[in-house]
Structure formats: structure tokens, C-alpha cells
């Protein structure tokens, strides 16, 4: 199980560090996003606290997925409250957006390997969801491309019916209603 956890953490870190993934959808509008992602990568590798805090808000592979725990939001509040002002004028201010991603195994059916998250999801016919915290300068299209480019190495893909633009929140929170609080 320790190897599985290590694989999961490596996948999450690779997702963050997947700056130069091939993508046909990359446009000049995403230049600021690319700068922010690169700066985040460098800062995370240097153990700068702001980058660690941003990464800390991400979901990790949830426990109990085989028993019905299919979505882990990460730390939604921590992500939306995040703000970093860089001294580098090229970077400027980094605000974040919380995105809920849903992913599933690809149809590539090969030998079953319990260390491969895609194999586990395919074997159990699961679709999981998790929260990620990315710069708000990144478009929904770029986030979708960014995530798909990376997770394919784990034999995963974003769910076919997934629309990223519907699942990202940029600094706006709906106030909880009384019934929401009671149900929590």
C-alpha cells in the first residue's frame, strides 16, 4: 500500500509540474498561466511556503474509494483564500481557482497492476473526483489539456462528459444556507 501512496503523490506532483506538456490548445492567452505554473513549479521545488500551501489544498487519492468515497474536494476554502504577490514583475499576483476534476481509466485493457491507479479504476468501474488548486489565470481549456496530458501516463483521462468550465470556482463562494450547515 505504501508503494501505491507513493505513486499517487508522484502523480499529483507531476500534474503540478507538467508545464511543458504537448498541447494543441495552448494559445497566447495562456501565457500568464504558463508563467504562473512555471513559477509555482520552481517555488515548490525550492520548498517555498506559499507554493507548499497552494499544493497542500489539493486532493490526494482518497481513502475508501472502493467503499464509495468517490470525491475528495481537497481544501476548497484554503484554495480560494490563497493569494501570492511575487516580487518578480513577470509573475505579478497569483490568485487561484478551485477546480473539481473527475477522472476515469482509459479503455486500454492490459495486465492488471494494483500499483496502477488506472487498473484499479478500470477493474472496479470507478470514476473519481478530486479538487485541484491552480492559478486563476489558466483557462478551462488549458486546465483540461494540462490535466489530460499528464494523467494519461497513469492510464487515466478526464471523464468523457466532463466540462471543466462548470467545475472551477474563482474566489467566489456561495454562502451556506441553514440547511447546508445542518446537513454537514
Image (cartoon, grey):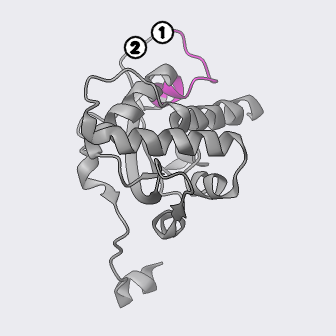
Q: What residue is drawn where x is 40% and y is 58%? A: 97
Mark 1, secondary structure of its residue? loop
Tag of residue 129: none
Is residue 137 located in the magenta-colored stretch of the structure?
no
- Residue designated by label 1: 110
Looking at the picture, how far across and down is residue 111, in whole percent? 53, 9
Looking at the picture, how far across and down is residue 88, in whole percent? 54, 51
Magenta segment range?
A: 111-123
Q: Tell me if 81 is positioned left or right of 141 in this view.
A: right
Q: Tell me if 168 is positioned left or right of 61 in this view.
A: left
CA gap, disc 2 and disc 1: 6 Å
Q: What residue is drawn where x is 39% and y is 33%? A: 146
Q: Tell me if 56 is positioned left or right of 133 in this view.
A: right
In the rendered view, would you say 180 is above or below 30? below
**Which quarter of the figure is the N terminus placed in?**
top right
Most foreground residue, 71 or 150: 150
Q: Quadrant of residue 12?
A: top right
Q: What residue is drawn where x is 34% and y is 72%? A: 172
- Residue designated by label 2: 108
* Disc 2 and disc 1 in contact, CB within 8 angstroms: yes
Amino acid at each position: 500500500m505504501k508503494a501505491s501512496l507513493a505513486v499517487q503523490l508522484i502523480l499529483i506532483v507531476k500534474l503540478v509540474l507538467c508545464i511543458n506538456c504537448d498541447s494543441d490548445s495552448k494559445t497566447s492567452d495562456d501565457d500568464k498561466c504558463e508563467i504562473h505554473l512555471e513559477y509555482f513549479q520552481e517555488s515548490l521545488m525550492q520548498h517555498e511556503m506559499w507554493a507548499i500551501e497552494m499544493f497542500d489544498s489539493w486532493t490526494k487519492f482518497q481513502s475508501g474509494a472502493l467503499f464509495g468515497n468517490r470525491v475528495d474536494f481537497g481544501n476548497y476554502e484554503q484554495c480560494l483564500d490563497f493569494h501570492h504577490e511575487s516580487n518578480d514583475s513577470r509573475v505579478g499576483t497569483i490568485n487561484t481557482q478551485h477546480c473539481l476534476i473527475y477522472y476515469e481509466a482509459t479503455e486500454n485493457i492490459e495486465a492488471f497492476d494494483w500499483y496502477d491507479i488506472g487498473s484499479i479504476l478500470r477493474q472496479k468501474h470507478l470514476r473519481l473526483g478530486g479538487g485541484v488548486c491552480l492559478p486563476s489565470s489558466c483557462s478551462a481549456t488549458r486546465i483540461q489539456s494540462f490535466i489530460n496530458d499528464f494523467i494519461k501516463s497513469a492510464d487515466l483521462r478526464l471523464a468523457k462528459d466532463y466540462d471543466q468550465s462548470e467545475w472551477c470556482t474563482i474566489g467566489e463562494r456561495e454562502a451556506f444556507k441553514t440547511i447546508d450547515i445542518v446537513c454537514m
